[in-house]
Image: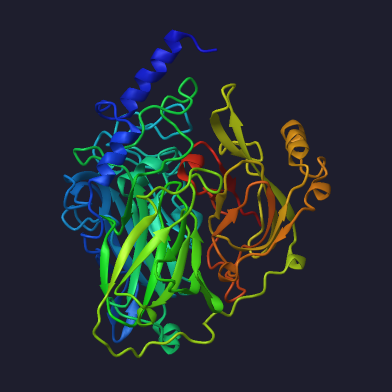
Amino acid sequence: MMTKSVLAVLFLVAGLAAGTGEPSPVTDKTLRRVAHSLKKYVEPLSMMPRIYGYSIKDGRPMSIGLTIGMFEKQWKFHRDLPATTVFIYGTSREAATFPGPTIEAIQGVPLNVTWENHLPEKHILPWDPTIPVAIPKHGGIPAVVHLHGGIHEPQADGSAFAWYTAMFREKGPKWTQTTYSYPNVQHPGNLWYHDHALGLTRANLLAGLIGIYIIRNPFVEAPLGLPAGDEYDRQLVLDDRSFYKDGSLYMNYRGNNPTVHPQWQPEYFGEVIVVNGKAWPYLVVQSRKYRFRILNSSNARYFHLSLSDGLPFTVIGSDVTCLRKPVTTSSILIAPAEIYDVVIDFSESATSTVRLTNSAPYPFPGGDPVSTQSSKVMKFVVSPEKTKDDSKIPATLMANYPVANENEGTARRYIVLYEYQSATGEPTHLYINGKRLEDPATETPKPGSTEVWEVINLTEDNHPLNLHLATFQAVRVRELVDLEAFTACMRRMNDAIKCNVKAHAVGQLEAAPEHEKTWKNIAKIKPGHMTTIVVKFKLIDEDAPYPFDATKQPGYVYHCHILDHEDNAMIRPLTLRS
């Protein structure tokens, strides 16, 4: 039991970590009142500025270098909310946006990016010094950029230990270089970039350090005839945020288990749904097909999306790859960090307004029912005018991917997700395989190999598992029977084989939804189940090795992408070895 003096010190340090002092205490009721005060569907959907990651010379795309900074700036989320101080990406402070600029790259054309930290000395949000966290000796806000879904060398992966402060004044222990090189060798698809600093991911992303990255190949994509161009091929970045009355971002200053962690809490959920930096926006659409690349960049919220008039989604891809053929579905469950590429045909709508709605409990799946506020996402206003639409939904897509085959696996690993609690029953931290990030790597695959990972979830939450560099596909989800006895054995022995997992993984078998049957970088790991994923450490569309040395330091990681879990500390090293 901690003494009162120790607790006082912890709260003092946590207060200093907040950057500025805690505003006047705020209740959940007040945060909900602020959200209710914002009229829905009055803000037009924003389009993020576009940056091209290549130049054209003699009709051919050529490699270039970009400089993109992180800046503190004021941002208007809603007409009735005062401007909000945020941290956002841009080529300059004036050009910086929430989300950051959309970077468009060309397949096979490398792009070099210098990510500059122009953030202030103190954070605009609270953070917790008692979890594993980057704490510079000379002040400043640590930051480092990770290209989520990217296939690139370890030095460009944005290691949590490769953080740096403004002007590279201070650097983390695994910092290597100022400029990151992205070869863009993978199939055309959807990626995103975000901060990845140790223990600060949840605060830095909540502050606004997110952006979209698209790899294109016109020669492959144009023949498909999908909706194209800025008007008909759009990105939707979904977030949730809460705000104080003065417009500033809310994040808790007191943790759920303050005698252990003064500030950390297991999940952050905001009262306001934000799309492309605007609260509950609207978009005027024509009576035709549109393509939407939908990213959930929330800290912890899942979205179960559907359209109010029964219009279906035609899913053409998920994360960085496309499906073999389009799949029509009435709803999509999208986890934090997950991306779905869909087509919506508004000519099939029987109404002039179509609402994008959400029905996911929070935390997912066993938490509170969705609120009146968070059940609404945005509105589409369908123009009555008829318009020419030459786009189509092809019968098959451009995917030439291998089938996910367990028999190709050269290793089978058991990956176990744990949550630990205090005597009060409140979470204190989360680990993978009972180990910390700082512990030596136990997952050491060979470049070019295929492995089978059996991911066992012994917590009550669904966890979006993310592997850096690799792509994978879930092939089986099996319920664990006699879960209490198996969990007790695992907490004693931390060994799935010794605890006879085969005798427990015999429950109900669940098939993956058709629109998730592709190679992904996010897998939703269901609680009380064992999810079998086939993991490939190679270029899947070419069945080829990586065109760089993936065994170099600082290596890669895999983790839960609920940011509050990742920060404390459901993250492990992933070190490739020859």
Q: Quadrant of the C terminus?
A: bottom right
For residue 220, side relative to residue 208 (left or right):
right
Please, which colouring scheme is shown?
A: rainbow
Give residue 577's position: percent from left, percent from top. 64, 54
Q: Is residue 486 left or right of residue 160?
A: right
Image-quadrant location for residue 482:
top right
| Number of numbered discs | 0
**The N terminus: image quadrant:** top right
Query: Residue 236 location in percent, x, y?
Result: 35, 64
Seen as rendered, the residue at the extreme front is: 350
Residue depicted at x 30% and y 69%: 380
Pick whichever, 297 or 549, lies toward us: 297
Residue 186 visible: no
Whether 159 is drawn above or below 359: the answer is above
In the rendered structure, the answer to whether residue 506 lies left or right of residue 3 reads: right
Between 368 and 322, the residue placed more toward the observer is 368
**Front residue (pair 64, 332):** 332
**Is 220 placed above or below 313 here?**
below
- Looking at the picture, does residue 553 appear above or below residue 323? above
